[in-house]
């Protein structure tokens, strides 16, 4: 990451690397979406990315996102933000006021709360099921029985305000490429298996890959990469 480069230049470089990875792995050009993860970066950074044509953003923390995004979305309704961090139930009410997707659904109780809050606002929201695929990461469904229970609740019509779109995972935080790739492969294989079992739903979104590993994720079938550092630079956690 060259910190002298602008957000615009970084975005152009990432888009071009995505295109190359799509070609290399025989993926349809344009089939991989780029999310700009703006956590810990100011609204001004989001505006710079927006001015460079970026419309999809990701945030981890509801409080931070709720300060940054609603005014920007009001000005530019085509801009959207997904929540990608672990979500406490008491934060759902605020999150569904501005987020267009919650990618970090990891339990049935969270679906119930999302349904309740979206019903109150009379809106629908997209969700992804977050899957635990790496030894070292903590978040996501860890067992298939719980995951299937959640999917089946959606199919039964328990959550009319929720549209399940697919799956998300965080690869383990390690330099071991084999482990990272294994995590992406296991998400792809799980998604194929569940899509086959639950034909009532269209679970085609595979959100995987970050700054350090998005090309590998694309090779393994990612449809949405979540890139922060390579666009906005290092995060300053002391703020
Ligand atoms: C922070 C974060 C990212 C972006 O990570 P970078 O390494 O900065 O690209 C992607 N996904 C999730 C869930 C994150 O929390």
Image (cartoon, rainbow, N blue to C red):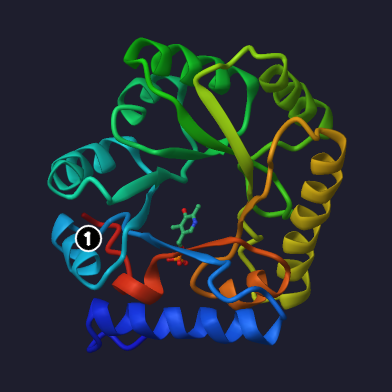
Q: Is mark 1 on a helix, strand or loop?
A: helix
Left or right, residue 195 beside residue 36: right
Left or right, residue 218 beside residue 99: right
Would residue 237 be visible to someone looking at this image?
Answer: yes
Tally of marks: 1
Left or right, residue 224 beside residue 10: right
Residue 34 % position (x, y)? 45, 65
Image quadrant in which the C terminus is located: bottom left
Residue 201 % position (x, y)? 71, 34
Left or right, residue 116 beside residue 6: right
Q: Of residues 211 and 206, which is closer to you in this image?
A: 206
| Image point (62%, 79%), residue name | 22
| Image point (12%, 47%), residue name | 75
Which residue in the protein does label 1 denote?
46
Up-down relation of residue 189 to residue 132 (above or below): below
Up-down relation of residue 188 to residue 21 (above or below): above
| Image point (37%, 25%), residue name | 91
Q: Of residues 53 and 84, which is closer to you in this image?
A: 53
> Which quarter of the figure has residue 116?
top left
| Image point (29%, 34%), residue name | 98
Mark 1 burial class by Cα count in 10 Å: few <14, some 14-19, many 20+: many
> Which quarter of the figure has residue 15?
bottom left
Disc 1 residue: CB within 8 Å of ligand 1: no
Residue 207 % position (x, y)? 59, 55
Image quadrant in which the N terminus is located: bottom left
Up-down relation of residue 97 to residue 187 (above or below): above
Would residue 129 be visible to someone looking at this image?
Answer: no
């Amino acid at each position: 990451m060259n910190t002298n480069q602008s957000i615009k230049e970084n975005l152009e470089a990432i888009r071009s690397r995505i295109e190359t990875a799509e070609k290399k792995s025989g993926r349809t050009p344009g089939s991989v979406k780029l999310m700009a993860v703006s956590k810990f970066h100011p609204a001004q950074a989001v505006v710079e990315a927006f001015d460079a044509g970026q419309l999809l953003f990701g945030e981890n923390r509801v409080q931070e996102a709720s300060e940054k995004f609603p005014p920007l979305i009001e000005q530019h309704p085509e801009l959207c933000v997904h929540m990608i961090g672990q979500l406490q139930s008491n934060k759902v009410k605020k999150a569904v006021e501005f987020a267009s997707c919650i990618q970090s659904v990891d339990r049935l109780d969270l679906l119930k709360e999302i349904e309740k809050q979206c019903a109150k606002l009379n809106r629908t929201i997209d969700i992804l099921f977050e899957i635990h695929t790496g030894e070292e990461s903590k978040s996501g469904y860890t067992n298939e029985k719980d995951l299937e229970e959640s999917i089946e609740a959606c199919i039964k019509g328990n959550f009319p305000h929720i549209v399940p779109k697919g799956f998300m995972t965080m690869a383990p935080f390690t330099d071991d490429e084999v482990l990272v790739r294994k995590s992406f492969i296991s998400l792809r294989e799980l998604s194929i298996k569940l899509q086959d079992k639950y034909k009532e739903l269209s679970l085609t979104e595979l959100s995987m890959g970050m700054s350090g590993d998005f090309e590998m994720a694309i090779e393994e079938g990612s449809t949405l990469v979540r890139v922060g550092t390579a666009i906005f630079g290092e995060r300053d956690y002391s703020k």
